[in-house]
């Protein structure tokens, strides 16, 4: 395919992210100054043109198939580290009792965040989630009393996000709870549109809390 034909594809038929990615794969395959060409093409596109034409399922499918040919799929054997301890219905064994929490607070790190769950949930609602990473960076450990069921979807998603940030930064977490871990979210959250997020959150909480309790 010559350069003129490729330029025509970008200008007229592939004005979308998948098309750009497919075109990039072609350019890389041809070893012909791909990144410079694509960068200029992206800059020259008007913001008002983004998304024009909307979604074309047939074009999307064909271009994804074309793009997939530029990659090789490798299977890696071994245990999935994301679910080392995950159970279908984790119980109370992952939480500290009141006496153990008192001991944890007495020996808390200098930058420990110690609070109760209702206060923490309310505070998270006052902070944009983009700030959660900075919060996780600023603390040495998190100690939370009285974990309770989350009934609001928005509160639940905020909690999922902050757990992800604590997990990514290996911030130690300890909690007391009024419920079993498997009762933190209602069943509708786990089977709904964000089910994977909530299931991942339970898995990560189980792992993080288990490291503290030894379970």
Image (cartoon, rainbow, N blue to C red):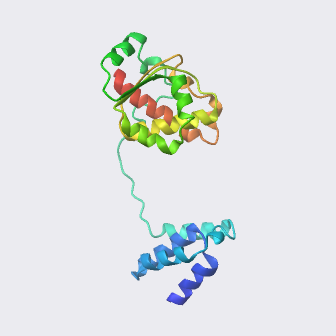
Residue 24 in sight here: yes
- Residue at point 42% right, 42% down? 134
Query: In this orientation, which residue lies closer to the viewer: 14 or 135?
Result: 135
Relative to residue 94, is residue 202 depicted above or below?
below
Place of residue 48 in the rendered image (x, y in percent of width and height, measured from the top left): 66, 70
What percent of the width, then of the height, locates residue 139? 37, 33
Which residue is the extreme one toward the top? 99
Q: Quadrant of residue 102?
A: top left
Identify the residue at horizontal 45%, vertical 30% (top origin).
205
Which of the image's four quarters has the C terminus?
top left
- Please indicate whether residue 43 sits to the left or right of residue 106 in the image: right
Q: For this view, does 102 lie left or right of residue 120?
A: left
* Residue 155 position in % (x across, y down): 59, 33
Residue name at image x 43 percent, y 19 percent? 95
Residue 11 lies in what quarter of the image?
bottom right
**Residue 69 location (% of width, % of height):** 48, 69
Front residue of 131/142: it is 131
Q: Nearer the viewer, residue 51 or 85?
A: 51
Residue drawn 42% across and 38% down?
135
Where 213 sits versus 10, above or below? above
Count the numbered circles shown: 0
177 to 52, vertically: above or below = above
Task: Say if residue 173 shows up in the picture.
Answer: no
């Amino acid at each position: 395919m010559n350069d003129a034909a490729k330029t025509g594809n970008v200008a007229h038929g592939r004005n979308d992210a998948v098309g750009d990615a497919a075109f990039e794969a072609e350019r890389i395959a041809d070893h012909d100054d791909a990144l410079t060409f694509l960068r200029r093409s992206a800059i020259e596109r008007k913001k008002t043109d983004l998304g024009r034409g909307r979604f074309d399922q047939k074009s999307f499918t064909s271009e994804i198939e074309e793009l997939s040919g530029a990659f090789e799929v490798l299977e890696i054997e071994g245990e999935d580290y994301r679910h080392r301890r995950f159970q279908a219905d984790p119980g109370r064994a992952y939480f500290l009792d009141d006496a153990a929490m008192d001991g944890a607070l007495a020996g808390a790190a200098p930058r420990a965040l110690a609070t109760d769950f209702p206060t923490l949930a309310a505070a998270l609602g006052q902070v944009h989630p983009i700030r959660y990473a900075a919060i996780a960076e600023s603390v040495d450990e998190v100690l939370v009393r009285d974990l309770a069921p989350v009934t609001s979807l928005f509160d639940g998603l905020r909690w999922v996000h902050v757990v992800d940030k604590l997990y990514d930064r290996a911030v130690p977490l300890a909690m007391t709870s009024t419920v079993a871990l498997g009762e933190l979210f209602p069943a509708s959250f786990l089977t709904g549109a964000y089910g994977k997020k909530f299931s991942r959150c339970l898995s990560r909480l189980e792992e993080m809390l288990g490291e503290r309790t030894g379970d």
